[in-house]
Amino acid sequence: MEDNINNYKYDDSVEDLKLRSFVEQSFPKKMDSNSIKQKTFMKIHDEQRRSHRRQWARVSVAACILLTFVCLGLWKILDTRRVETLTACTKKMEMQHIIVPVGEKMTIMLSDGTKLVANSRTTLSYPKTFQGAEQREVSIRGEAYFEVAHDAEHPFVVNSGKFKVKVLGTRFNISNYDDSKSSVVLAQGSVEITTDNKDLVRMKPSEKVVVENGSFVEKTQVDAQDYTSWMDGVLTLQGESVNDIAEMLSQYYGVKIVCNHVNSTPLYGKLVLQDSVMDVLKTIKGMVKIKTIRKNGEIYIVTN
């Protein structure tokens, strides 16, 4: 039947044209075996390509899921480290505040091994730990003796509010009670002082530096032991006037002592601070002609 249709002779009539179109669409032309094989292989190849694409799609989805989990894991680790860092910073900023009671002394060991002895009515502020800090910094108002643990990579800085003392490892005494001249006496090692007015002073052992109103005043040679004897309850006098002594006693005992028209005779000797303030003043009376009057919780010193 197929041969008859293929051999049919068409004319130019409308009916034959329609018939020819129908036959060509319904009955494809003869194909040889090679052509059939080629088309079959092409069909198989197309199916393999589609299969590979499906496999790659599955692999891509799996990779995306894995990458998502990896990113989530990294975020969790980094977030945990961030929390640990914040915790470490918080610990680093944890401050200790100490106020030494009137007439007492206090020995304090810092986290780096530095030892300090704080005098009566001294206020100290320092971090609970120096870990992670570029420098070890302590703030003081009053008087204290420092034995600083050596650490070349982390300088030790004492902030007095009026000046700063920078050291690596040394022993020194600092005194900066309110409303008085501040001083630093170096017992061992070396220190560098920077004042509020940008004065820079380097010290050697047995030197005393005086700072007043944020400015360098003088540097003198002294016996450092005379300025640390207060740790043993003794105040060594090195030519101070009654006014100077009254100010020191006022700071130590926490009582207001007023000097009225007392001469400025320099005094030398030792005062035992374990005694009461009135007993100490009685000792001073043996050195210079003065009398003391106690009134309304205050002590007045006048020329006898």
Image (tube, helix red, strand yellow):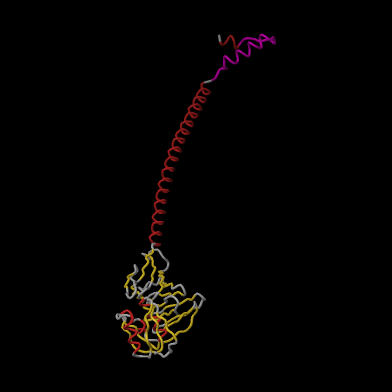
* Magenta-colored span: 7-31
Residue 143: x, y in percent? 38, 76
Residue 150: x, y in percent? 36, 73
> Is residue 41 or residue 128 the one in the foreground?
128
The reply to whether the magenta stretch includes residue 9 is: yes
User: Looking at the image, which residue is at 39% across and 51% down?
Assistant: 80
The reply to whether the magenta stretch includes residue 257 is: no
Which image quadrant: the N terminus? top right
Residue 233: x, y in percent? 31, 80
> Is residue 64 or residue 106 the one in the foreground?
106
Q: Residue furthest front?
A: 295
> Is residue 234 or residue 67 the one in the foreground?
234
Q: Quadrant of residue 90?
A: bottom left
User: Looking at the image, which residue is at 32% across and 79% down?
Assistant: 231
> Is residue 177 or residue 36 the one in the foreground?
177
Residue 18: x, y in percent? 65, 11
Q: Residue furthest right?
A: 12
| Count of residue discs | 0
Q: Is residue 208 above or below residue 44?
A: below
Q: Quadrant of residue 186?
A: bottom left
Q: Is residue 85 above or below residue 127?
A: above
Which image quadrant: the C terminus? bottom left
